[in-house]
Image (cartoon, rainbow, N blue to C red):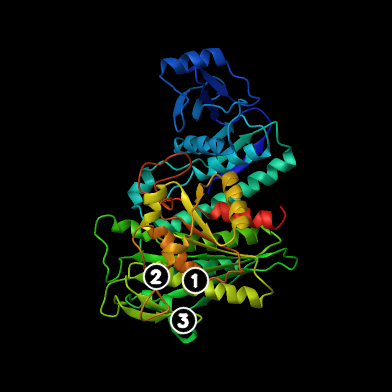
Amino acid sequence: MTSISATENGVTDDVLVVGLSCDSAKKLRIHSGSIKLDEKELISALTDLGATGSYDEVVKIPGTSTKLLVFTGLGAPLQDGSFSHERLRRAAGAAARQLFGHTSATFALTHRDDAGFAAVAEGALLGSYEFIEFKGASAVKDHKPPLKKIAIHSTITRATRAKALVSRAEVISRYTALVRDLINTPPSHLTPDSFSQRFKKLAASSKASIEILNDAQLKKFGYGGTIAVGQGSASKPRLVHISYSPKKAKARLAFVGKGITFDTGGLALKPAQGMEAMKSDMSGAAAVCAAALAIAEMGLEIAVDAWAPLAENMVSDTATRPSDIITIYGGKTVEVLNPDAEGRLILADALVRAAEFGKKAGGLDLIVDVATLTGAQSVALGTRTSAVMTNNQSWSDRFLEISESTGELFWPMPLPEELRPSLDSPVADIANIGDRMGGMLVAGLFLKEFVSDDLPWLHLDIAGPAFNTGKPHGYTPVGGTGVALRTLVALAEQSAGK
């Protein structure tokens, strides 16, 4: 794991990372904080190299006081000459991705406040991620590892504050790496049970507690959605509940995450092309469980319960059939018209249980579900922006403001009443699919049926951003991204008064 520290002193590492921007007049400018460089000579060299200072561009040249000088693109500055915190985060991440094989580096990107310092620290750590668990011995021997040590240079942030900020960045990056690892793990090695056991080990050394329900218990207690989705697989379903309840908790939040460890589509079999990415269909479950452990490690005065219904949606003679009727936890019946609309079935179980548990625990302030739920999400918003749907506008506004600060892109989407009748079933309380047009919104309306109107609820559809099948960018690698974790933690921090 990469270590990180703050420094106000001169550069002692072999690599120095600084920012490079380009204004509307195509004029390059170096941004190195308080570290003085021969800007005129360097700009001339960078111009000869064809540098543009654009986002995601990284240019390396030999240094004078350091062995290597790295310029990472910041794009065009804002009107006041500064850069958004997310732009700093991405620039630091892009540089870190290009420094695999080097041991240590000092990042000196111009920032104006503590949040900017934190963004650089987060980006550098998030960009230093790799997943080589299944590489052979020869491949591991020859590969170039990420930076082992990172120093963030600043004369803006006080030393004590800087220490706390890099400590937080380390926690955030470590749990983001956990989410990414789980997403990248193939379904041959990640099943509902192995997912559960991994978090059981992690919770054992945490301030949080964990409860795991097996398939027999799920049947006994009536978790019909989770059982129905998982009954076609030899890997039986589970329900993970991670709870963190400090004595002076200022509020209680519930996080519910979709945990389909692999999704074939069941008897509504998906096309073979692209099915390999369905190992990422448990991204929501990984995000909420890791967020709960991160919140516990940070010792926030906020109670958090993470719920992860886990199942493998497989094809077999025991798989749920189109037209089967199942009973969700709490008693509502669902006609399963499409077995590939399975995520909403396991989420319905967990949403009802989370609300029930929260009420018995003294009341629930907010419930958030996180899911790679619909292909329609990617059609509507692309692969970098997630959707937010809600029954409480003030909480949605609050969440969107927080997500802007974390750099995770979310966009509000409606829950149109006119689409709700399309979910009506002549033989059950509700069908699991409705109108094809507006499919993301219909899925949200289905989940809304399992949340009481007086309980604030946010539904996050992260289908596109959860798994990057394109090129790496900024601090985002290929494969699992870990999206939603940072905003969930920040939401808990704000709710705890941090």
Q: Which of marks 3 and 2 is nearer the N terminus?
A: 3
Quadrant for residue 183, please give it: bottom left
| Comes first in the chain, label 1 or label 2 | 2
For residue 218, the mark is: 3
At label 3, the amino acid type is Leu
For label 2, the crowd category at 10 Å Cα-Cα, with few meaning under 14, some 14 to 19 and many 20 or more, is some
Res. 440 visible in picture: yes
Mark 1–mark 3 Cα distance, whole angstroms, equals 21 Å
Q: Decide which of 232, 377 is in the foreground and name it.
A: 377
How many C-alpha atoms fall within 10 Å of the one at disc 3: few (<14), some, or many (≥20)? many
Mark 1 crowd level (few <14, some 14–19, many ≥20, 10 Å Cα): some
Residue occupying the point 74% across, 68% down: 247
Q: Nearer the viewer, residue 147 or 369?
A: 369
Q: In this view, does 194 lie to the left or right of 315?
A: right
What secondary structure is marked by label 2?
helix
77 lies above or below 474: above
Q: Quadrant of residue 64?
A: top right
Task: Measure the C-alpha gap from mark 1 to mark 2.
Answer: 10 Å
Give whichever of 396, 66 is nearer the camera. Answer: 396
Where residue 334 sits in the image (x, y, percent)? 40, 77
- Expressed as whole percent of the image width and height from the top left, the position of residue 480 reads 42, 52
Residue under circle 2? Answer: 423
Q: Which amino acid does label 1 sit on?
A: Glu
Which residue lies at the image location 50% right of the left edge and 39% below the top edge?
Answer: 93
Where is residue 462 shown, x and y percent of the image? Answer: 45, 55
